[in-house]
Image (spheres, rainbow, N blue to C red):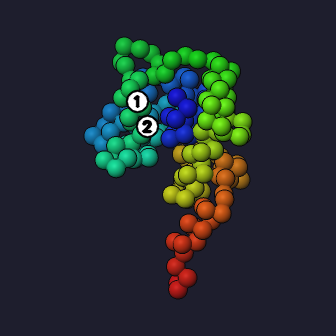
């Protein structure tokens, strides 16, 4: 569920309440359609376009294929937020991650990665955020990202 959030920017409230009938199959692949628990805004994510592997199969779709079951109401097991974050802390300790790993870090991961791929306005829409100032809180710029961005600048224009 945490990896799915890293690939989709879903809040924990949306990920834990994600129902199987929110997943739509279209010609291109899977799409998520539902209203956000927190904002009540529509979430329309073309999962088939997010984080594709070398065979052009998206990682979110691969996760859905593991969990999707029309006979069950919810996509993921129903686990309380506190328990999820306790498990993430245990995983962080085992992986020697030096910061506080919580489910919310998934949104920051998505925001940082996508900030190099889409405009801030598109990122706002993908993350269901209403203003640019808030979306920038989720973008963790570092020297590597800045250098990569500057490599794409055409200084002759």
Give the farthest residue toward the top. Answer: 71
Residues under labels 2 and 1: Cα distance?
Answer: 6 Å
Q: Is residue 78 left or right of residue 86?
A: left
Residue that appears at 55% across and 59% down: 116
Residue projecting furthest to the bottom: 156
Q: Position of residue 52 (x, y in %)?
A: 39, 47
Q: Position of residue 80 (x, y in %)?
A: 63, 18
Secondary structure beneath label 2:
helix
Q: Which residue is mark 1?
A: 64
Residue 40 visible in this rendered orientation of the protein: no
**Camera-side residue of 119 and 115:** 115
Q: Residue at x 55, y 52 (%)?
A: 113
Residue placed at 52% from the left, 86% from the top?
A: 156
Position of 145 relative to 55 (above/below): below
Q: Which percent across, then down, holds residue 86?
A: 67, 23
- Mark 2, residues whose alpha carbon is within 10 Å: few (<14), some, or many (≥20)? many
In the drawing, what numbered circle is on residue 20? none
Measured as percent of width and height from the top left, residue 91 is found at 61, 29
Quarter-of-image position of residue 63: top left
58 with respect to 132 (left or right): left
Residue at the spot of label 2: 60
Q: Is residue 73 visible?
A: yes
Above or below 142: residue 3: above
Most foreground residue, 124 or 142: 142
The reply to whether dot 2 and dot 1 touch (C-beta < 8 Å) is: yes
Label 1 sits on a secondary structure element that is: helix
């Amino acid at each position: 569920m945490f990896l799915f959030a890293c690939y989709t920017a879903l809040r924990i409230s949306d990920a834990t309440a994600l129902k199987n009938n929110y997943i739509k199959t279209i010609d291109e692949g899977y799409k998520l359609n539902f209203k956000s628990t927190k904002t009540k805004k529509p979430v329309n994510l073309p999962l088939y376009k997010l984080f594709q592997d070398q065979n052009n199969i998206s990682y979110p779709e691969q996760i859905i294929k593991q969990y999707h079951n029309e006979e069950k109401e919810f996509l993921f097991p129903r686990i309380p937020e506190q328990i999820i974050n306790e498990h993430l802390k245990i995983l962080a300790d085992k992986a020697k991650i030096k910061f506080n790993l919580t489910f919310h870090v998934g949104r920051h991961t998505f925001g940082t990665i996508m900030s190099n791929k889409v405009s801030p306005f598109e990122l706002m829409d993908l993350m269901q955020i209403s203003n640019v100032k808030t979306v920038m809180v989720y973008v963790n710029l570092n020297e590597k990202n800045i250098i990569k961005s500057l490599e794409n600048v055409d200084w002759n224009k």
